[in-house]
Image (cartoon, rainbow, N blue to C red):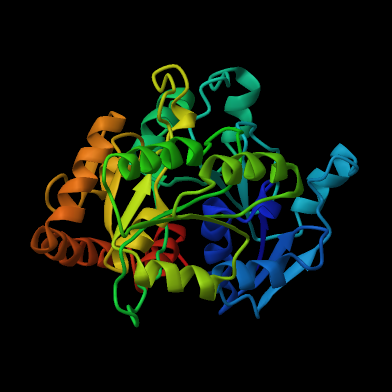
Amino acid sequence: MKIGIFDPYLDTLGGGEKYVLTIASCLADKYQVFLFWNDKLILKKASERFGINVKNINLTKNIFSSDTFFFRKILSTKNYDAIFYVSDGSIPTLLSKKNILIFQFPVNWVNGKNILTRLKLNKIKNIFCYSNFVKKFIDEKFNIDSVILTPSVDLIKVNKKKANLILTVGRFTKAVNAKKQGVLIDAFKSMCNKGLSNWRFIVVGSALSQDTMYIDELKKKAKNYPIEILENVSFKVLLDYYSQSKIYWHATGFGEDLEKHPEYAEHFGISTVEAMGAGAVPVVISAGGQKEIVEENKNGFLWNTLDELKGKTNLLTENEELWKKMSQEAMKRAEFFAGNRFCNDLKKILEL
């Protein structure tokens, strides 16, 4: 079987790209898998960023790029038994035998019920979503019943003693799905000013060249506080910080009108689960997919205001027994998303 995979955001190498590359890696053990991408270094970069086995994944010309003629693009899809297509809201015309759409976020700006869209959807066998949060909006928009395939998450072996570290992980960007690192830096500074001592805040994220100015703003904001800002670290370095951290913060969607723009919330929360798997207790915003991961007062905390974020974090910094109990529960929760579950569910859904 010949399988093609297209993700228009592949060069950002964020959580969505890890999801897509995990699909590719799962299927490449048995089938011919091709990524439609023109940068020949993308697989090397992905392996370093995510630690994913890309050995059996192939690259091929990106037929979905804007410089490919429309009819040539369509005809080229006939050469594949299956194509996975990450949608930005558009519905492609695909002629492979089995077509799968992946929606990573709500697309409320799309008219999902017009005639042309309905005709294109007739050629789609499956539509994947990350979470119930995304599924709710996609199903309503396109009048469909999408399938939830939650991301695969690596369980991280804790090989170092836990330190007084708070960690956040996410792309450095001000675009859609911004991770709000500046908000978290301000919250940590406020806690330090009110007496928090002997704790550090680690801000890790991927970045493209256009994100440099934003990172400089964050570094300026963090100056003179125990805050480290690290961009484009290797998977090995990221694992080391997961292993050491006691608390995990996440703020995507804070300050946004999520009724009007649900796409600004976290669509799932891969980094949250990865941190939980390493024993970090999540203190994350009560929005988007995060609410499907964290069970309040059991394996983490959810917050709506910055006062709640700081207050619930203080509960953990001041009570070691509470932290230990919730850390154990966080690791148990992360186990649900790990192992062969993702690959097995993927093949079952696709009837492979």
Q: Is residue 344 above or below residue 298?
A: below
Q: Is residue 211 above or below residue 241?
A: above
Residue at the image point whose x is 63% and y is 72% from the top: 48
Which of the two residues, 286 or 214, is positioned nearer the viewer here?
A: 214
**Number of numbered discs on residues:** 0
Q: Quadrant of residue 302?
A: top left
Q: Is residue 103 left or right of residue 281?
A: right
Q: Is residue 296 above or below residue 327?
A: above
Residue at the image point whose x is 43% and y is 62% from the top: 346
Q: Quadrant of residue 117?
A: top right
Residue at the image point whose x is 44% and y is 23% from the top: 256
Residue 299 in sight in this render: no
> In the rendered view of the protein, which quadrant contains the N terminus?
bottom right
Which of the two residues, 135 or 169, is positioned nearer the viewer here?
A: 169
Residue 27 in sight in this render: yes
Which of the two residues, 150 or 277, is positioned nearer the viewer here?
A: 277
Percent from the top left, x then y, of residue 232? Answer: 63, 61
Percent from the top left, x then y, of residue 258? Answer: 41, 23
Q: Is residue 276 left or right of residue 127?
A: left
Which of the two residues, 32 or 313, is positioned nearer the viewer here?
A: 313
Percent from the top left, x then y, of residue 286? Answer: 28, 35
Q: Quadrant of residue 111?
A: top right
Q: Is residue 106 left or right of residue 132?
A: right
Residue at the image point whose x is 30% and y is 67% from the top: 277
Percent from the top left, x then y, of residue 321? Answer: 8, 63
